Image (tube, coloured by chain):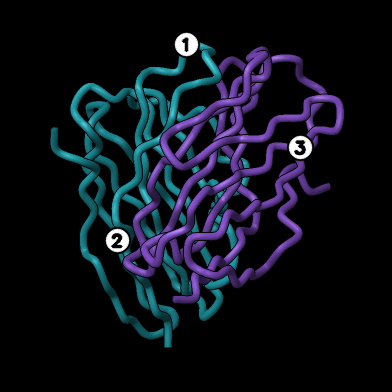
Amino acid sequence: AQKITQTQPGMFVQEKEAVTLDCTYDTSDQSYGLFWYKQPSSGEMIFLIYQGSYDEQNATEGRYSLNFQKARKSANLVISASQLGDSAMYFCAMRERYSSASKIIFGSGTRLSIRP
Amino acid sequence: EAGVAQSPRYKIIEKRQSVAFWCNPISGHATLYWYQQILGQGPKLLIQFQNNGVVDDSQLPKDRFSAERLKGVDSTLKIQPAKLEDSAVYLCASSFRDRGEMNTEAFFGQGTRLTVV
């Protein structure tokens, strides 16, 4: 079963508009972490934002915020005032316990294209 | 601070040949990951090391893939023999020692793009 689901394969947004990228997850653990990464065409994965399962406040990092709805198991990324440089693949990921350690698993990604 | 280093950046080989990728993690990072990213998909974890011990290799095709992390620093991922479906970007990542905290982010290298023809 899919652990991380990103239902939007691609999105087009006008520059300066806000955009929401959807992510739902599946886990039976109480303790887990949620991440968003950006992957530009150059290929590197860039960490954007983190939300812990026990965090009561939604995480924010500059223009990025995470809309965390624990009961619905969703962790949507909101980018405010989008810029041309935001065009990239965006991946939602979850760190969950595995045996005595933990591991990070990724969703299938959303390709975001910003129109000038 | 130097990031995760990977080499080579690109590799083209014929099927049934062998290939090796190298990764040098961020200094002090005890956990090292190898991910396979097929075009249009998210990264898939192949193997995870804690120091020089394997934590998880459940998705590593062990009949053809092998990985090692001697001395708990650099790591090498090998494919022998390669198949067409191994064409992908191989990403190496590292993070601080896994003590069970969920907020430990992984830092990624630029990846090696493998094309098998």
Q: At x 34% / y 26%, what residue is drawn? A: B52
Q: Which chain is cyan?
A: B
Position of A28 with respect to A53 (left or right) is right
Residue A53 drawn at (x, y percent) = 67, 19
Residue A21 drawn at (x, y percent) = 65, 53
Numbered disc 1: secondary structure = loop
Q: At x 52% / y 71%, what residue is drawn? A: A113
Q: Which residue is mark 3?
A: A74
Which residue type does callout 2 highlight? Answer: Ala
Q: Chain of mark 1?
A: B
> Measured along the vertical axis of the image, is residue B117 above or below residue A47?
below
Which residue type does callout 1 highlight? Answer: Arg
Whether the residues at callouts 2 and 3 have beta carbons within 8 Å, the answer is no
Position of B67 with respect to B71 (left or right) is right
Q: Which residue is mark 2?
A: B20
Spatial CA distance of label 2 from label 3 is 38 Å
Residue B113 drawn at (x, y percent) = 35, 70
Spatial CA distance of label 1 from label 2 is 30 Å
Numbered disc 2: secondary structure = strand
Q: Chain of mark 2?
A: B
Spatial CA distance of label 1 from label 3 is 26 Å
Colour given to chain A in the rendered image: purple
Q: At x 59% / y 29%, what residue is drawn? A: A95
In this rendering, the count of numbered labels is 3
Position of A100 with respect to B90 (left or right) is right
Mark with earlier residue (1, 2): 2
The nearer-to-camera label among 1 and 3 is: 3
